[in-house]
Amino acid sequence: MKTILVLNGPNLNLLGRRQPEIYGHETLADVEAACRAACAEGFDIRQAQSNHEGEIVELIHGARDTACGIVINAGAYTHTSVAILDALNAFDGPVIEVHISNVHRREGFRHHSYISARADGVIAGLGIEGYAAATRRICTLVGA
C-alpha cells in the first residue's frame, strides 16, 4: 500500500468554522474523506495538520520514508516559509500544493508562494475538491 500524506498548515484545524464565506463549511474530516474516495487502488491517505512550522517540517521529513507523495496546504506558511520549502526539496516524490480559496483574488501577499517553487502542481479555488484532484494526480504520477 502506498501512502499519500495530506498535510495542512495553520488554522486549517478550524476548517468549516473559520470564515466559511471564504473556506466553506466542510471540515478536515471531509477533506480526508474526499481524498480517500479519490485514491486509486493500492493507495492510502495519512492526514496531518499543525499550527507549528517546525512540526510541519518534521512531518515532511518523516514522509521521506513513509509516503509516495504529498498534498500540502501550508496555509499562511505558504507565503513565508523557506524552511517548509527546504523540507519539500528534500522529498523525492510528487508534491501538489492546494489552496481552498483562489489566493490570486485575495490580498497581494497571498500571491507569492514559496511552496510553488517545489510543487509539481498547484490547485487554487476549487474548495476541498482541490484536495481530491491533487490526490488523483499523485496516484497518476506514482502509478500502482
Image (cartoon, rainbow, N blue to C red):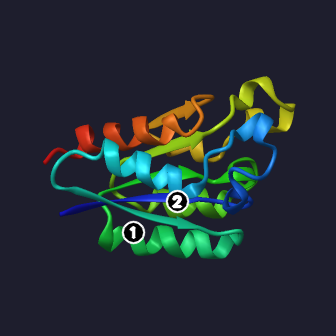
The residue tagged 1 is: 63
For disc 2, the marked residue is 7
Residue 80's spot in the image, x, y percent?
76, 53
Q: Position of residue 63 (x, y in %)?
A: 39, 69
Q: From what the image shows, is residue 41 above or below residue 123?
A: below
In the rendered image, the quadrant that contains the N terminus is: bottom left
Query: Horizontally, is 121 left or right of 57 in the view?
Result: left
Callout 1–callout 2 Cβ contact below 8 Å: yes
The residue lying furthest to the top in this view is 105
Question: Which amino acid does the dot numbered 1 rest on?
Answer: Ala
- In this rendering, position of residue 139 left or right of residue 7: left
**Which of label 1 and label 2 is nearer to you?**
2
Q: Is mark 1 on a helix, strand or loop?
A: helix
Q: Position of residue 72 (x, y in %)?
A: 53, 52
Image-based side of 119 in relation to 56, left or right: left
Residue 88 shows which numbered tag? none
